[in-house]
Image (cartoon, rainbow, N blue to C red):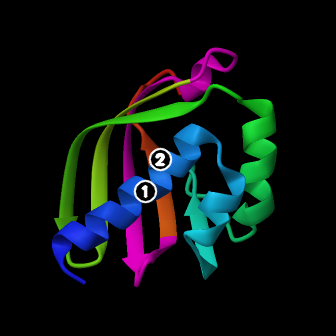
Amino acid sequence: MNAFDVMMVALKFNEKINQQDHSGLVKLMADDHIFIDYAGEIDSNMKEGWRQFFERYPDYRNIFTSVTVTDDVVVMIGYSTCSNEPRLTGPSIWMARVRGEQVAEWRVTWLDPRN
């Protein structure tokens, strides 16, 4: 895949998060997909994890201000918003490792020292 296609897979994945489109998100997850949170905790069961996240945080959104691609890795810088959980609001960096037309790894790093 070229850099544009790799970037579009990651952006589409985030679009599904922002839309809280669980079934669309699951289709974009590789079978061995992992999520790595701000604390470095690895979750390999995010098919269910995203469903629970969407139920808890119905207005959570990621907004990117910068996107770069190197090989199969997309780095997105921006911020998230969430009205009912202040810890989920603020500047962050996301990293997606893309394999084919799916995301094999989604990692988030919070930049806000309050978190």
Foreground residue, 53 or 5?
5
Q: Position of residue 87 (x, y in %)?
A: 59, 24
Which label sits on residue 15? 2
Density class for disc 2 (Cα within 10 Å; few <14, some 14-19, many ≥20) is some
Q: Position of residue 32 (x, y in %)?
A: 63, 82
Q: Is residue 31 magenta?
A: no
- Whether residue 9 sits left or right of residue 82 in the image: it is left
Region of the chain picked out in magenta, as a range: 82-104
Question: Looking at the image, do the residues carrying marks 2 and 1 touch, with CB atoms under 8 Å apart?
Answer: yes
What residue does disc 1 label? 12
Relative to 97, residue 66 above or below = above
Q: Secondary structure at mark 1?
A: helix
Q: Position of residue 39 (x, y in %)?
A: 57, 49
Q: Secondary structure at mark 2?
A: helix
Q: For residue 91, what is the image quadrant?
A: top left
Instruction: Please report the residue visible at 70 percent of the width from the left and 53 percent of the height from the top.
Output: 22
Kind of residue at badge 1:
Lys
